[in-house]
Image (cartoon, helix red, strand yellow):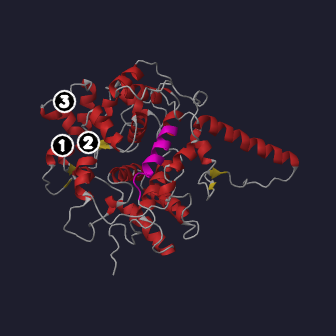
Amino acid sequence: MVDVILARFTSFRFSRKYRVPILGKPRRKIEDDDGGRNEAWLVFGVVVVIFSAQISWNNPSGESKKKPSLSSSSSSSSSSQEEEPLELVTLVSLASSDGGQDFFMETTADVTSQNLEYDFYRDTCPQAEAVVRSRMARIYSQHKNVSAHLLRLFFHDCFIEGCDASVLLDDSNGNKNHAIEKQAIPNKSLKGFDKIDQIKEVLENVCPGVVSCADILTLATRDAIVLAGGPFYPILTGRKDSTRSFFMEAMMGIPRPDDNINQTLHQFSLRGFNERETVALLGGHNIGKIGCEFIKSRINNFKGTGQPDPTLPPEFVREMRLNCEDDDNKATTTAAASPLVSRGLSEKFTSEGMSYFQQLSSSLSSGAGFDTHYYQSLLRGRGLLFADQQLMANKRTAQLVAAYASDDGSAFRMDFSRAMMKMSDLNVLTGSQGQVRLDCSLPVHSS
């Protein structure tokens, strides 16, 4: 329901002065007074629904209505929150008594100083977003897995020094001898680079040197999520591209599949994400496959014990082994040796893997695509990654998992949209910062 409402507002235009959304002109001409009144009531009704829904952000699903005392310690504050009952969120019960900022005003307020705008290219390349959308539709029609690939690529870019397309670079500051993010162990299995290059090539023919690779990746990811059945969310544009790639930061800063809940929450909190946003973002695992390279150590040699993860149900271990047991005999690509292999990720990658949707029974699934089957799997102890299942090891995050799994998906889709908008604005380069690359894999060098 929420994504339908959001989709109704894809024609939003923003006040250039205040950077807040205002309704565009009605798509249908009003021909008489009665029709005008009907259109007005329709618009008013939709605005009321969105406003009442968005004032809830300070009282999310599973979140206490009581604000923790700022003078208390973080541990005591967390403890007091955990004692309070879980409140499942529906569209009817989203509004909180203490109110909150408007969703779009809150989101754009944080990035106004960064010079991001809605429809940034309206004068310099007005067809930019339409080009991205049409190319993504064509790519998706041929490669359904592109949504998961771009979502992961986008996440790995934004998590390291912000959404600056640094993960796309083949050299750093013109130094091809400098290690790049693509070579970092967590990034060796990333895919989708060629799809971004395809879109960039089209845009360079239409508007040479105008649209940044950072904006292309951000917009393409949003459109890929929508194509996979996910929610639409507005994107501000005007990002510039980094000239540097950050190898060591990528080696140390990407959350690991074997992280415990404290490590995962810490990594996300460093980027400004709270528990609710973290749980919502991890729900992106509901599309695509988890590669066997991330699964096998958990079922064969968990934490170096030579045994499976003891928290896994025995029948699930058998199922995982059945899916990945022939993995070693199938075509692989072996990456170059790295001094930091001890960080625990395999350097051998295959096309094999498992998805959350594939391993969830039809009786529990709400359908294929972008829904809550990820959270339903965690409730059954069937998280494919240790880090995923660890969401059930913390009372607070477990409450959020239960909340997302228990409704029709509306709460998850709204929270995921909001968290993705926040993610897309992490440490962006704008204005005189950075550059607009002509080739997404190479920085532009001044002559």
Nearer the observer, 35 or 51? 51
- Looking at the picture, tell me which residue is in the foreground, 434 or 1: 434
Q: Which residue does the image show at 22% across and 69% down from the upper left? A: 176
Q: Is residue 252 left or right of residue 36?
A: left
- Among numbered discs 1 and 2, the one appearing first in the sequence: 2
Q: Main secondary structure of the magenta part?
A: helix
In the rendered image, residue 233, in percent from the top left (x then y), is placed at: 53, 48
The residue identified by callout 2 is 256
Q: Secondary structure at mark 3?
A: loop
**Could you give the CA–CA distance between mark 2 and mark 3, rounded to whole angstroms?**
18 Å
Q: Residues within 10 Å of mark 2 (few under 14, many from 20)?
A: some
Image marks 1 and 2: residues in contact by CB distance under 8 Å: yes
**What residue is drawn where x is 21% and y is 62%?**
179
- Relative placement, left or right, of 106 versus 13 is left
The residue identified by callout 1 is 344
Q: Quadrant of residue 317?
A: top left
Q: CA distance from mark 3 to mark 1?
A: 15 Å
- Sequence-first disc among 2 and 3: 2
Residue wearing tag 3 = 308
First of labels 3, 1 by sequence position: 3
Amino acid carrying mark 3 in the image: Pro
- Disc 1 marks a residue whose amino acid type is Gly
Residue 322 highlighted magenta (yes or no) = no
Dot 2: what SS?
Answer: loop
| Residue 330: x %, y % from top left | 21, 49
Q: Specify the amino acid type for callout 2.
A: Arg
